Each structure stands twice: as structure tokens, then as C-alpha cells.
Amino acid sequence: MKNLKRKILVTAVLSLSLMACTPAQNKSDAVSKNKIVQVVNFDNQRQIDELVQTGIYYYWNGGDLKKVEKEFFKGITLKGKYDVVENSFREASNLDPYRLDLRFSIASTQVIQGKIIEALETYKGILSIEPNNFDANILFAAYSRINGDTLSYNNTLKFLSTIEPEKTAKYVASFERTENFLKINIKTEAYKVEAPNHTIVTLGYALANDGTMRPTLIKRLDQTLAMAKLNPNSTIIVSGGVPKQGVTEGHLMKEWLIKNGIDASRIFIDDKAKDTVGNAVHSTEIMKKLNTKNVTLISSASHIRRGLSVYKEVSVRENLDINFDNLVYLDYDSVEEAMKVSAKEYMVVYRDTLRGSGLWNYPGIQR
């Protein structure tokens, strides 16, 4: 950083000197001036790239907080991996304040941490640079709603309706769908599906460190097996791609179903997904090929509302008309308890549904 500041200072001094020169001198020195500016810009870009890579690495993997404090963030005490992510993008944004993707990334990381008020301020900063930026406005509206600020939500949508009426209407419809999924009745018993082109989609769950399936995933597969037996003509998608000991959730899920009597030809694997949004994106690609029209989504009760909302959003974005129903492994003491939506779940459902609509967490870098 000291070298960077020195180069910037040198550039400023030389620029003033060039301004004081005669026109002929200015012309002859122009190439040298441009070279200096290019060096400074190159150093900035290199630092930005390093900071972005650090942020994304810690987003997925975490790491040694003391080490990254020493190397990147002197004077800042880091409390967790998302502190690293947020500060990485903040430092990068300080180097290039007009790169809005970096500011969006700061806001996304604040949302992940539940820092909604801070995220709203970050979106305001983006809008101070680009007042008509649709993505910043719709995100500001959504998180204002989540934060209970109905006035800001309504005013922002009213403004957007004047500049992007069709796009705004699509998001209003998305918000209505999300609210409906948050109220959906969860189903705990397998059922017969009469509708055509039916697919059972089962969401994975993180494997144990030794590469075996945890009880939660097996419970989801129990429900999948029951659904598959009642609906022998239904195709099955198993979705989960985070490998442990060289195997993925999707691979083990398919193996388990085959061992329990399900024909392998019915089962399709998505082993690329790393999270719920990835599940939806990759499973939807498979559903396109299967010409799926009706889906039973299987997950834990604590996860099903998010799964349904995200899957529907991705299918709408892909212009697919798919009906979604659910079956859950009940990870609560009762159905009544499972039907309650906490403030945190409410926020996370909206967050991932917005991602499913195409508003990625880290634009151009990571969904």
C-alpha cells in the first residue's frame, strides 16, 4: 500500500509539472505520462484481483484469520470468514470506487451476515453513483421490505415502474410467489401424483468428512424412495455436488436408491451444485431435457420453503411452466412448529430467490 501511495503521489506531481511545460514539452512528455498512469492502474488492478480472489476463497473455504489479518487487513480484527470476504471487497472498492460490482459484493456479504441496515446503506451508495441502476433499486426495495420499511419498498417500486415497468412487474410477481411459498403447507407423507411429466427432485446435504451420508440426507432419501415406489413412472433427480473423499452427494444418493430397488434409468444426477441456488440451476437444466411439467421437491422441512421459492424462480427465469409441490423430512418436533417462519429464514428465502432471478451475490464472479 505504501508503494502504491508513493506511485500515485509521483503521478500527481508529474502531472502538475507537465501542465506547467510548454505545448511542445507537453507533447513530447505525453508518452511518459501515460506510462506512469498505466503502471499505477496496473498495480491497482493487481491488488483488486488479489483481494477479490481472497474474498471468494474465504467465502467457500474459510481459513486462517490471523494470517489474512497480517497480510491484507492490518489494524482490523476479523471475527469470521465473512469478515474476510466483506473487507476484501471493501478494500478492493476503495481502490476503484466506481466499480459497482465490488459494491454489490460488499452488500451481498453484509446480507449473508444478516447486516441488513448496512447492506441498505451500501445500496444507497451505489444509487448515489447510478440512481437508475435497476439491480440496486430492486435489491434496495426487497431488503427494505425484509427490514419492515414498507414506505421505502413502495416508493422504490413506484420509481422503478416509471423507468422499467415490465421488469418491475416481474419482480413484484416474484415477491408474491415468494410470500405464497412462505405460507405453503408442508407434506410429510408420500403421495400419488396423477399429473403428467412428473419428476421427483431430492436436494442433497453435506457429507461427513469421511465421505459418508449423514442421517439428514438418508431421511430425505427415505422420502424419495417412498415417492418413487408410489409413482413408478416418475423420473428422479438427485442434486448435490460438494465432494468428500472423492465422492459427491449426488453420486451416493443415486447408489443408495439403486440399492433400495429403484431402476437406475429413472435417476439423473446433478453433481455440480454447491448450494440451493446451484441445485435449482443445474436441476432445471436436467428438467428441460426431461420435459418436466410437475415436480415434487424433497428436502428437510427447515429448508423446503427456500428450495421451492428458488426452484420456481429459476424455472420462471428459464421460461418454463413447472408446478412445484413438496415432501419433507420433518426435522422439527411437529408440523405446527415446522410451519413457523423465523425472521432469519424469511431473509434467507428472499436472498436466495433474488439470486435465482439472476441477481448474483458476486456479479461476474460467483452466484
Image (tube, rainbow, N blue to C red):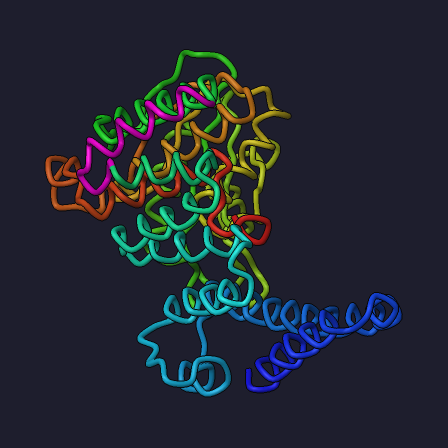
Q: Is residue 36 left or right of residue 71?
A: right
For the N terminus, the quadrant is bottom right
Q: In percent of the image, x 31 and y 48: which residue is there?
A: 120
Q: Is residue 304 visible?
A: no
Give the vertical position of 160 relative to 13 (above or below): above
Q: Is residue 175 visible?
A: yes
* Total labels drawn: 0
Residue farthest front in this picture: 22
Q: In percent of the image, x 36 and y 32: which residue is there?
A: 309
Q: Is residue 269 left or right of residue 141?
A: right
Res 347 → quadrant: top left
Q: Main secondary structure of the magenta part?
A: helix
Q: In percent of the image, x 21 and y 27: which residue is there?
A: 183
Image spot of residue 25 (x, y percent): 85, 72
Image spot of residue 58 (x, y percent): 47, 69
Magenta span has 196?
Answer: no
Res 188 → quadrant: top left
- Which of the two residues, 128 or 158, is positioned nearer the viewer here? 128
Give the vertical position of 119 relative to 41 (above or below): above
Image spot of residue 226 (x, y percent): 36, 32
- Which of the two residues, 342 or 248, is positioned nearer the viewer here? 342
- Which of the two residues, 198 or 121, is positioned nearer the viewer here? 121
Q: In percent of the image, x 32 and y 46: which residue is there?
A: 219
- Give the residues drawn in magenta, as a range: 145-163
Res 348 → quadrant: top left
Image spot of residue 42 (x, y percent): 70, 70
